Image: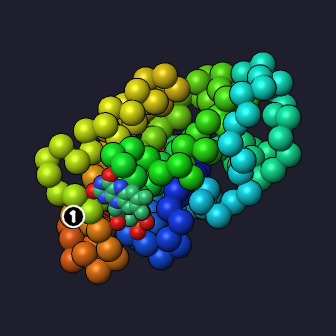
Amino acid sequence: MRIVILEGSPNKNGSSNMLAEQFQKGATEAGHSVQIIDAAHANIHPCTGCIHCGYEGPCSQKDDMDEIRQKILEADMMVFVTPLYYYGMSAQLKTLIDRFCAFNSSIQRKHMKSALLTVAWNSDDWTFDALEAHYHTLVKYLNLKDQGMVLGKGCGSPSMTKQSKYLKMAYALGKEQVN
Ligand SMILES: Cc1cc2nc3c(=O)[nH]c(=O)nc-3n(C[C@H](O)[C@H](O)[C@H](O)COP(=O)(O)O)c2cc1C
């Protein structure tokens, strides 16, 4: 299947992208075609709420979202990748998701698969409660089929993440994907 990975960290070689890389490795080995979209470094502007799109139509803004929209709609699975920022997803990833507004029904009709890869400094058991709740709500609303989450607690820096079990978990999640 075709998988798009939506990366939301400003750190190109940071911990969340390390999980994304491992997921990509596993999924590629399993025969899937994987494309990475670096939302944090793409030219994506926040939704202006103008509703020119009517919730399904051309967006009034001309930026990288035209191309990203096409890539998402050609894919069978979306993987959300984000560092934990104030107990939610990063603004970079949220900015991309808000722009789903202009092709919301198209996403809902596709019944795409999805996954969440995330890292945080904190390692309390409640660290990801709010992000998990948001992700599950998006899954429900967008008619996604959740394939799993890797919640990297205590992954505050790349060196901490390298020593953690989460890289292997991200690889395994990629590898176990079936068409
Ligand atoms: C703006 C900002 C907000 C953060 N908020 C949290 C937080 O709420 N909880 C937490 O445990 N870590 C928080 N962190 C730490 C990051 O989640 C952590 O360092 C992570 O490894 C960064 O991932 P990256 O290397 O992929 O960018 C925050 C970091 C930044 C820069």
**Above or below, 140 relative to 160:** above
> Residue 37: where, in percent of width, then height?
62, 58
Residue depicted at x 28% and y 72%: 161
Seen from the viewer's position, the closer of residues 136 and 24 is: 136
- Residue 97: give x, y in percent of width and height: 58, 39
Residue 14 figure quarter: bottom left
Left or right, 157 with respect to 39, comes to left
Q: Position of residue 101 (x, y in %)?
A: 67, 29
Q: Is mark 1 within 8 Å of ligand 1?
A: no
Q: Residue 68: horizontal and vertical position, in percent?
A: 71, 49
Crowding at mark 1 (Cα within 10 Å: few <14, some 14-19, many 20+): some
Q: Tell me if 51 is positioned left or right of 109 in this view.
A: right
- In the picture as drawn, the residue positioned furthest to the left comes out as 125
Q: Quadrant of ligand 1?
A: bottom left
| Depicted 52 relative to depicted 166: above or below | above
Using the image, determine if residue 144 lies above or below residue 71: above
Residue occupied by mark 1: 154
Locate residue 47 relative to residue 161 in the image: left or right: right
Q: Amino acid at mark 1?
A: Gly
- Give the residue displayed 81% in from the left and 50% down from the top: 63
Q: In front here: 151 or 157?
A: 157
Residue at the (32%, 32%) spot, across then down: 133
Tell me if I can see residue 40 in this picture: yes
Q: Quadrant of residue 107?
A: top right
